[in-house]
Amino acid sequence: MNSIKVVYQGALQQQVTHLASGQQFLTDGPLAAGGKGELSAPTDLLVSALTTCAMTIMALKAESAGANFNGCYAESGKTVSMEDFRVVKIEITFYLKAAYSPELRQILESATTEMCIVGRSLHPSLEQKFNFIYQ
């Protein structure tokens, strides 16, 4: 069941290890909480998880339809409410290929909300805003 190991390094930094691969990275506490702000904060990982999940699902759908998904990318960010002490909004802009047919575009856009396990696991009060730019 365990897939991640987290070891506190001091100064609000933590080493995260993916146990199956041994891949490691560090996180940092946000500046607002006294962290250095030098590395991704835990809330950034939340945004990354949603973004990469949606991109993975879109890549699967595109490739299963015979379309090349290489080079597509996303930029994402978050809004944090310090009053509620939670992330209240994640906004992702996906940059996809202009050559995609209207049918494929609909499949990809629907897949982000219907099939992304991360997004479907988040509390409904967290607003997920997805923008799609075809270029």
Image (tube, rainbow, N blue to C red):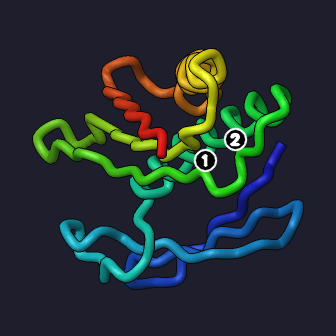
Name the spot of residue 113 as percent of width and height, x first: 53, 20
Residue under the image location 15 percent in, 47 percent down: 82
Q: Nearer the viewer, residue 133 or 52?
A: 133
Residue 113 placement, left or right of 83:
right
Q: Nearer the viewer, residue 71 or 101?
A: 101
Point out which mark residue 52 bears: 1
Point out which mark residue 56 bears: 2
Placement of 94 over or under 102, stated as above or below: below
Dot 1: within a 10 Å radius of its alpha carbon, few (fewer than 14), some, or many (20 or more) residues? some
Name the spot of residue 6 as percent of width and height, x first: 63, 66
Point out which mark residue 104 bears: none
Name the spot of residue 75 as percent of width and height, x first: 42, 53
Residue 18 visible: yes
Query: What residue type is disc 2 on?
Result: Thr
For mark 2, give the secondary structure.
helix
Residue 10 position by quadrant: bottom left
Dot 2: within a 10 Å radius of its alpha carbon, few (fewer than 14), some, or many (20 or more) residues? some
Placement of 128 over or under 18, stated as above or below: above
Residue under the image location 43 percent in, 35 percent down: 132
Query: What residue type is disc 1 on?
Result: Thr
For mark 1, give the secondary structure.
helix
Name the spot of residue 78 as percent of width and height, x first: 30, 47
Q: Are marks 1 and 2 in contact (CB under 8 Å)?
A: yes
